Image (cartoon, rainbow, N blue to C red):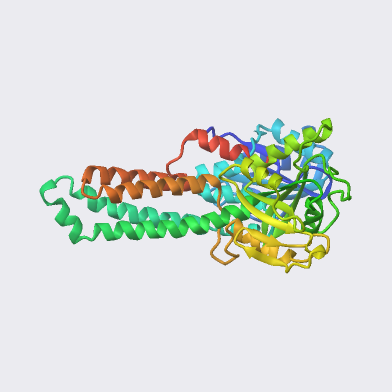
Amino acid sequence: MLYTPDTIAAIATAPGRGGVGVIRVSGKNLQALISGLLGREQSALKPRFAHFTHFKATDGSTVDEGIALFFPNPASFTGEDVLELQGHGGPVIMNMLLKRCIELGARHAEPGEFTKRAFLNGKLDLAQAEAVADIIDAQSEAAAKSALKSLDGAFSREVHALVDALINLRMLVEATLDFPEEDIDFLEAADARGKLHNISAQLARVMDTATQGKLLREGMHVVLIGQPNVGKSSLMNALAGEDVAIVTDIAGTTRDTVRELIQLDGIPLHIIDTAGLRDTTDTVEKIGIERTWVAIAKADLALLLLDSREGITAHDHDILARLPESLSVLRVFNKIDLTGDTAGEIADDEIHVSAKQGIGLQELKAKLLKKIGWQGMNDGVFIARERHLTAIRTAREHLNIADSSYLQIEILAEELRLAQNSLNEITGEFTSDDLLGVIFSRFCIGK
């Protein structure tokens, strides 16, 4: 993949005031910029050494003073010459320094362009490049640690091992294409089908780990639904650990969706409290109920709140009948402090709690993690994205077709090739320019 090797510059630190701000510059040759900005030759900068210096304006006056760090290619993040300027972190000073770099021939970097150049120059593969953004965006300590594993190449090594095994199997299969009269005997002697099954089993293990990594990265959207006054807002507050929703004895208090992000075992759960579902003539409440159904359509899991004194009513059955078939539902019987029922799980999809008294909340949290498929944090979990899971699912489909078409050598060979291409999409060894544009456009400026 080709790109214009011009010089790019950006503020690498977050917007706002700070003690230190960083400008990052990357390009094929930074001699002119270094000379104009620092008043010294590039060769005078010791690689990876902190040089205290003055940053010069066009007329030779000082824009700021600070530290200059030079990373010559290829031993830099981007694989090009990289200059980092550490100055005072005020937005005016940072913009003055950036403007000076532009005057000296650099251009404003696009979002993610530094990391994109690292990928294009072979410093990172695509899964590692995405992990850079995932570390920055991590919503929990567990997610940050898992993203660091992906940046270190844990996910990529798993993918490369699968690709290597596929290549070896393809060599066996395609070698038989020139000798069709001996193909089946040759493949049986080489245990080609056993190798195919081993690859499928290995792919299934990677899929399980990647699924856990996606949960760490993106979390799940959990919507609280039910009739008015069953305790949805009380449960929202109990899970959040603070009063984020208004609670009264008046039915219909919640008229709009209330959202809160909580952490359960490092998993981000986006909890959405909704308006009670009932027939109403109140215009505002009607709008809230409409928004409830929109939230339900986007949710991964629904908690149907029920008053344990009444059980599941006919209206609750109507609510259940309207829910999407693909939506997982957990029935939460609330207010057991008023009935004396035992807290905890009563069936696979039912649990007893008292949101007001905090009874059964630990059991509910454990049940939530189980419902979303979380198996617990371990050292092997690496961060993953939906596009990774899609590529793995596609590869698995091709392997299944390959297994069912085992005696048709041409189909077998083609399906193995397609499976390899799907896996290569994860690391970027087989990736369209359009996909790269989408991925890196979501990065921060300066990364």
Judge whether 220 appears above or below 91 on screen: below
- Residue at point 42%, 48% (across, down): 423
- Residue 428: where, in percent of width, then height? 47, 44
Q: Residue furthest left?
A: 181
Nearer to us in this view, 217 or 103: 217
Residue 45: x percent and y percent? 65, 50
Q: From the top left corner, tell me how far across and down residue 88 is, in percent.
A: 82, 47
What x and y, as percent, mark residue 134?
Answer: 63, 50
Identify which residue is drawn at 57% across, 47% down. Answer: 130
143 is higher (above) or lower (below) than 9? below
- Choose between 43 and 322: the one closer to the eye: 322
Q: How many marks?
A: 0
Residue 272 shown left or right of residue 158 in the figure: right
Judge by depth and name the residue closer to the eye, 423 or 343. Answer: 343
Q: Quadrant of residue 31?
A: top right
Q: Is residue 366 above or below residue 312?
A: below
Q: Residue at x 74, y 64 (%)?
A: 361
Q: Is residue 123 visible?
A: no
The answer to whether residue 369 shows anywhere in this view is yes
Q: Nearer the viewer, residue 429 or 446?
A: 429
| Residue 252 left/right relative to 292 | right
Quadrant of the image for the C terminus?
top right
